[in-house]
Image (spheres, rainbow, N blue to C red):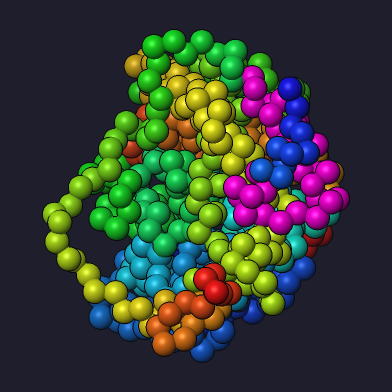
Amino acid sequence: MGIREQDIDKLCVLAQLGLDPAERTRARADLNRMIEMIDAISEVATDGIEPLAHPLDATARLRADAVTEAVDPEPFQRIAPLTRDGLYLVPRVVE
Amino acid sequence: MSNFRSLAEVSAALDDGSVSSVELTQDALRRIRAAADLNAFITVIPDDRALAQAAAADAMRARGTATAVTGIPIAHKDIFCTAGVRTSCGSRMLDSFVAPYDAGVVERFDAAGAVLVGKTNMDEFAMGSSNETSFYGPARNPYDLRRVPGGSSGGSAAAVAAGLVCAATGTDTGGSIRQPAAFTGICGLKPTYGRVSRWGMVAFASSLDQGGPMARSVADAEQLFNVMAGFDPRDSTSADRPLEPVERRPLSALRIGLPREYHAALTSAPIAARIDDARRALERAGATVVDVALPHTAAAIPTYYVIASAEASTNLSRFDGVRYGHRCVDATDLNDLYRRSRSEGFGLEVQRRILTGTYTLSVGYFDAYYLKAQRVRRLIRDDFMHVFRDVDLLMAPTCPGTAFALGAVSDPIEMYQQDVFTVGASLAGIPAMSLPCGFVEGLPVGMQLMAPHFGEATLFSAGTAYQEMTDWHLRHPTADTR
């Protein structure tokens, strides 16, 4: 089972990438080879083995539900491509 | 004065007043500019900023509050956020990005009085093993400018190996500190996962990424590690435990395992011979060397590329052309803005990994790939934990070959095989260090030592003992070899 044209379409939508036709052809070929390579893991017996999400089996630390810092939005908005009056601007979404 | 002095020697010269940090910094900046052909730096710090930091370091020393790195010029990989200085991550996406804050690692070096002289070149978003995916062009190997310095921390490796600085930082997700360290004949340590703060370090694969030191000797790397390591409450995966004291254990007290799967997979006879020389040197010093098995080794590369790509596709979804980073012009609607900003901002390898990760995380494939890879990851980690019941350290090659020529490896799948000996420790989260153990045809060879979780002290102890018996770490490229 290989990656089809329409699979690339779907992945580009999910990943929000806009590829031109030449890039799509290449992406499809690359992805097929990638999948061939990673498919090797299917041969490893993992019955009864729990997934490992953190190499030390640690879970995220919790902290008290309290405000610990005040963030000044100004330095963060200064590096944004386009802002006005403290808002991030994007093309119109709702007419 | 030699450009290849150790951190301790430079620190002693600062202490006895024979040189000031301002002079050292001027010297480092001059050398960096003169070595532009290495392309080791993406950003060189302006003289006034660097020299102000150096003057503050000299004042710190005069007050008697100097640390081991006070006044030492340092280079940070361009993945660590630096307030007021661009952090590009080797990508067009962040070509004009100036972070509003410093990374935890940068804060620690600043507080200790180190002097930032530049941000080093790297593969784009740390995805690569040759530095060739950098938007700014590849850094070069100081042993041969036609060859790669390795990656992704190739700029830091080239800068240290060429004597531009004696201290640098890197990050390692699947080998990105160790492989360039091996290719350039220096020492690079990937610490235990959670040991060094990831706060302010641009994320690639969050369950694997770890910052670490790059230096010319194990002793220097240890000094840098002591500055970098420690708990940071802002990183939710930071390990909340004190640094282990380094007990100097003689090599005669150590049992060292040779993972037979690694040695069997090493096809280069001259590299195998160098690793064998190192093994014999350790044995002569009294170490007990035994064969051990890591049975799931063959699955490490595919497991790594499933997990790293999946986490990358998630992490890199933050780059949207809205809040920071590259934004396309004249977007017709919001989706057009996202798609064109991302496709223009990301290079080919980054897009390849995002697509792979998107595929393995998508409906219908998640269990077969991502969850399956996490299960295999546990088996790989447990292999390591099992052998560490019997041995103190593991010894293996760092890379399957020496530094290759620019452009020589154009196939991505072939490039991924560079990581064959390094991804195991990454998946297991254990500390691993590459240190030089000889040359093949004039190019450095690295050996890798791996220790149990939080066993950095054993790596420093054994690595230093090895370097007391050998002089590979004192070799450096000359003007001729460049």
Is residue B177 rendered to the left or right of residue B69?
A: right
Camera sees residue B146 = yes
- Look at the image and give the residue range highlighted in magenta: A11-40
Q: Residue at x 72, y 70 (%)?
A: B35
Q: Position of residue B257 (x, y in %)?
A: 48, 19
Is residue B4 rendered to the left or right of residue A23?
A: left
Question: Vertically, is B339 above or below B209?
Answer: below
Q: Main secondary structure of the magenta part?
A: helix
Q: Which residue in the rendered view is the most extreme toward the front?
A: A95
Q: Quadrant of the C terminus of chain B?
A: bottom right
- Asked where in the image residue B67 lies, by quadrant, the reply is bottom left
Q: Residue at x 56, y 47 (%)?
A: B313
Q: Position of residue B44 (x, y in %)?
A: 60, 76
Residue A10, magenta (yes or no): no
Front-most of residues B157 and B273: B157
Front-most of residues B235 and A14: A14
Q: Residue at x 54, y 47 (%)?
A: B312
Residue A31, magenta (yes or no): yes
Q: Quadrant of the N terminus of chain B?
A: bottom right
